Amino acid sequence: MPISMEDFKAAIAKLENADELFEYHSQSVEAERTRGIEAKRKANREAEGLRAYKKAMEALGYNPEEHTDLNDYIETLKAFKQAGPQGSDTEISKQLKKLQRDLERTVTELNSEKQAKAEIETKAKVSSLKSTLAKPFSERFFASDFIVDGLIGNGTVDMEDGQVVFKDGDRVLSFEEGVKWAESKFSDSRRNTQKPGAGTPPATGGSGSGRLYTKDELNKMKPDEINANWQDVQKSLTAIAN
């Protein structure tokens, strides 16, 4: 269920990085709103271009009910042009050239629009995933941003039917199950929220190369690098926290 900016700010107020998280969220929302407006304007321009293209085709006698294959009709126009006097530049040839240019431009614009729409949808999904994971992961883990980026980057966390899910191999876990899975998976980075003597779940995965990264090196790492060297990243985070 959508929440207002005021409710979102109140919900994260107790987090250590509440101001930074709220600023990031606000900037992301505004950026997506701006891209949405620009995409709508571009779609309107393309719609105008398509209407003009349709009008030009009708002027050339094109009837979609009679000419079911547009490419065949264009080939017919080309043949008509070639049958005319050699080297002549009749009105029909001018219209045909313009139609070809308009068609090529329209196809290019539509492809660009699809790509832009896909990028906006991807960024919106990533922003939503980060917002959902921010609080529970910051409460449970040191350097939770690195963990969240890694899980999103390798597809472990995804959105299905409007719900955030975790993917562990062939298993699809609910959000609550996924958070518990992460507590075991990233136990080396967990905050000390347990009662004395309660114990800590064993770490999973390989032992790594034993390298310790500096904080600056961790900040520069990409999600795939974090995943590839996760055991060393966990040890580095623990060393930094201590």
Image: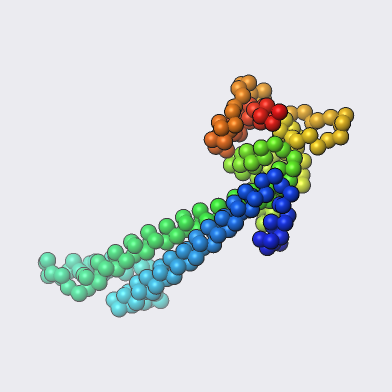
* Residue lying farthest to the top in this orientation: 210
Q: Position of residue 128 (x, y in %)?
A: 63, 53
Colour scheme? rainbow
Residue appearing at x 47%, y 63% in the figure:
39
Image vertical order of residue 215 relative to residue 58, above or below: above
- Determine if residue 8 is in view: yes
Q: Quadrant of residue 66?
A: bottom left
Lateral position of residue 210 relative to residue 177, left or right: left
Q: Position of residue 161 (x, y in %)?
A: 67, 56
> Is the residue 6 above or below the residue 55 in the image?
above
Dividing the picture into quarters, in which one does residue 166 lie? Answer: top right
Q: Residue at x 20, y 74 (%)?
A: 91
Residue 202 location, x and y as percent? 77, 28
Q: In the image shown, does 132 or 214 lie closer to the viewer? A: 214
The answer to whether 55 is drawn above or below residue 140 in the figure is: below
Label count reads 0
* For residue 6, side relative to residue 200 (left or right): left
Q: Position of residue 146 (x, y in %)?
A: 62, 38
Q: In the figure, is residue 92 to the left or right of 161?
A: left
The residue located at (71%, 28%) in the rendering is 242
Nearer to the camera, 106 or 230: 230
Which of the 4 quarters of the picture holds residue 75? Answer: bottom left
Residue at the image point whose x is 60% and y is 31% from the top:
215
Q: Quadrant of the N terminus?
A: bottom right
**Residue 159 visible in rendering:** no
Along the line of sight, the residue nearer the viewer: 106 or 178: 178
